[in-house]
Amino acid sequence: MTKRLYYDDLFQMQFEAQVVELTTDAERPAVVLDQTAFYPTAGGQPHDTGTLAGVPVVDVVERAGDGAVLHVLDGPAPVVGSMVAGLVNAVRRFDHMQQHTGQHILSQACLKRWNAQTVGFHLADTYSSIDLDREPREPVDQVMVQVQEIVNGVVFGDLPVRAWFPTEGELAALRLRKPAGAHERIRVVQVEGFDVTACGGTHVTATGQIGLVVVRRWERYKGGLRVEFLCGGRALRDYCFLATTVRDLATELSVADTDLADMVRRRLAEAQEYHHLAEVRGNALLDYEARELVATAEVHGSLRLVLRVYEDRPFEEVRRLALRLTEEPGAVALLAARGDKVQLAFGRGPDLDLDMNAILRAACQVLGGKGGGRPHLAQGGGPDAAHLDEALAVARRHVLGA
Ligand SMILES: [Zn+2]
């Protein structure tokens, strides 16, 4: 079993150790040392990175069974028996210590506030989250404001954080936040006067080191809540991001940042109104265009044939025009939009018996494509734009021959 130096000194980032074994982890070279300051991935906290004898350590894994710590190397491994210098990436480690200790306090605050137990913890590269087993009865936004006050109160109090292996008698007397799992030796992390829990992770030594703790967002999850939070350096970077975003938007909209939300809501409502207006006008224009097309259509008995090819007109508009023409008694619309490819929209009035679906399929075949729809309205297309005239001629023959 590898001696873990971070149990005694959480801020020891340099160490000397002897190589006791060369092995592999998922086909990557790995070494086992007699002692290490590297934290292996466990309990929701990701592993440390750094170097061993100058070679990058890209993963640190705890071996099941004997508890040996495997240092996965991206380079040549040192020989067994040699002494090597280890260097842990202190920035990454300290970030993990801030997030993990912050998590303990946040979990206890949720327990105190509405008796929610933490059933999951995830420490990702840019954010962290806990999963709680129940929702509060009150609106979550309000509760989260209170929870953040509790958590940051503990931070501002700069309470000592202690991690140790208690004796069995000592352990029995401690009131753990939740029952400890089955381990040979239970390690306990205590935020003085606030929280005691079993944990093997790395933590700060006083709560002031965590810095600000913020709840970034939350969502309902498996009957409870998933709460995303940021501590210390991450909270600072997020604040800077939010502040820059708010300042830039406020400048762009020429309002004070305190008026930004109202202004954005007003602008969105306006945009919706304009959109609605544009739709109404667009429909009126389409209506006008449809009547114009029927008035100038090719007349064959009671049938009004509208055959048009549009260059670079949005097909959606052409399709809506064909749809509008299905309302006109006697009308047959054979409409095409020609761009990179050809798209067709065929429709006919409600009083006619033509199967526009079949006619469209025949035309699409000429274009080397396909399509479909219903007897009164169908759409499709094909890549062979050079044969558009022929395709429309085929459709026209079907219409007039029927
Ligand atoms: Zn923990």
Image: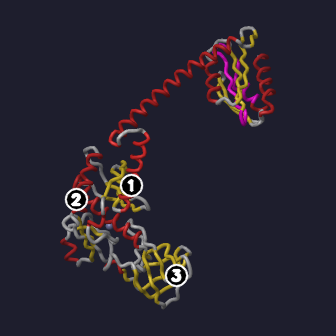
Q: Quadrant of residue 231?
A: bottom left
- Horizontal placement of 48 versus 26: left or right? left
Q: Give me the residue at 44% from left, 76% from top.
A: 63
Inter-mark Cα distance, 2 to 3: 47 Å
Residue labelled 2 has its Cβ within 8 Å of some atom of ligand 1: no
Task: Name above or below for residue 317 compared with residue 332.
Answer: below
Dot placed on the residue nearer the N-terminal end, 2 or 1:
2
Residue 281 pos. (x, y %): 54, 21
Say the numbered circle drawn on residue 93: none
- The residue where tag 1 is placed is 240
- The residue where tag 2 is placed is 153
Between marks 2 and 3 in the image, the one whose residue lies nearer the viewer: 2
- The residue where tag 3 is placed is 23
Q: Which residues are magenta?
A: 339-363
Which quarter of the image is occupied by the N terminus? bottom left
Q: Camera-side residue: 18 or 349? A: 18
- CB within 8 Å, label 2 to label 3: no
Is label 2 in a helix, a strand or a loop? helix
